[in-house]
Each structure stands twice: as structure tokens, then as C-alpha cells.
Image (cartoon, grey):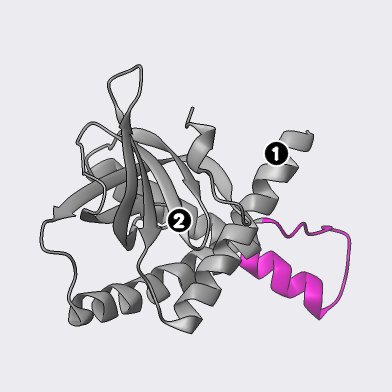
Amino acid sequence: MMSNSNQPTLLAFEERFSVTEQSYESGFSVENIIDFEQAAADVLTAIIALEQMSYEHVDPDSKGITSDILRLEQKLDFITELLAKSLQSQQEKLEKNNIKMSAENVFWNSSISINKGGFCLLSIYLSDKYPTPLQLPVEVISSEVNKLGLTEHCGRILLSDEKVIDDLTRMVFLYHRRQIARNRT
């Protein structure tokens, strides 16, 4: 479990995901950030669409265009899930990691240490249905070794495009809502 001293104060969620990180000694150029924002926009669009589809319940006895569309979405969701499972079986398995995330900050544990003020590209595989990770350029705000010998990092997400930040906030809201629903049952 992550320490409570650096938790975000805004809307956030906590879940286990496959994660990789790559250290950037000299930080990120403006061009790097723009490339990461474009890639993040694509991933966030897909993740949001998949998350919204997976919560719709269809009454098999209902009639009408809305129920037909929802049935088609469920079939697409099922096909997407099968395709993703097929792709995952071909990929190497990454260890899952506890992630706490808001639209501004991300907290994660790592076997590698990145010093405060350091930079890294954090790749988070948010959905089994979508095998492309969300890549976030991050500046490390704090870094502490825990009792297990893992380094607990807190990082500030360095995305600045308003649409990408809006989509990231929306995705955080969807995962937060899913976490609340799971805790209620």
C-alpha cells in the first residue's frame, strides 16, 4: 500500500496495472511532450470508449433502436475482449503494480529508483481490452524506499494540452466511479 503523505487531494483512483518506466536523465523536450500528448489522446479516447461501453446493461426483452445499439456495442465489446486476450497471450507478462492516479499526479512503486527532480516516461497498461499503454511523461516529486525495498514514487504528470488533460480527468473519473461501485458490492 502506498504511503498517505503524498496522496493527491483531487479526484483519484487506485488500482493494480502493468507498468513500465523509462528514465529520462535530461528531461523532456517540447517535441517529446507534444508526441506523448498525441499518443495519450489516442489511448485515452479508446480507454474511455471501452469503459463507457462496458457499464451499459441491455435488457434482452426491450425493443427499440437504443437497445439494438447497446446490443451491438456489447457484441463489439466481446469481440474486442477476445482480440485483446489473443494479443496479450503473445506479449510478455508484466508484473502488476499498485497505481494511484489523478489528472495531475501519479503514485507508483518500482524496483528502480528515480531521484526527486528526475524525469521518466511511465507506461501504464490501463485495460486488458486495449493492449497499448498510456504513456505519461512524469517529473518525480518524491521518492522513498518502503519496507519491501521498493521505491515509492510520486510524480507530476507533464501533459499540458487542455483536451488531453480533460480526457485524462474523464478517464480518472470513470475509474474512480468503477472503484466506488466495486467497493459497494
User: Is any atom of residue 56 visible in this view?
Assistant: yes
Q: Which residue is mark 2?
A: 105
Going 84% across and 58% down the picture, which residue do you hit? Answer: 59
Query: Residue 6 at what x, y percent from top left?
Result: 48, 42
In the foreground, 122 or 55: 122
- Name the element at disc 1: helix
Query: Residue 24 at what x, y percent from top left?
Result: 14, 58
Q: Amino acid at mark 2?
A: Asn
Magenta residues, start to end:
55-74
Going 72% across and 68% down the picture, which residue do you hit? Answer: 70
Could you say which quadrant of the image residue 107 lies in?
Answer: top left
* 69 up-or-down from 183: above or below: below
Q: Is residue 43 magenta?
A: no
Q: Are marks 1 and 2 in contact (CB under 8 Å)?
A: no
Q: Amino acid at mark 1?
A: Arg
Query: Residue 25 at what x, y percent from top left?
Result: 11, 57
Alpha carbon of mark 1 to alpha carbon of mark 2: how far?
A: 23 Å
Residue extending furthest toward the left: 26
* Circle number at residue 78: none
Going 80% across and 80% down the picture, which residue do you hit? Answer: 65
Near mark 2 (Cα within 10 A), the count class, few <14, some 14-19 or many ≥20, is many
| Label 1 vs 2, first from the N-terminus | 2
Q: Which residue is mark 1?
A: 182
- Name the element at disc 2: strand
Going 29% across and 54% down the picture, which residue do you hit? Answer: 122
Could you say which quadrant of the image residue 74 lies in?
Answer: bottom right
Q: Is residue 68 magenta?
A: yes
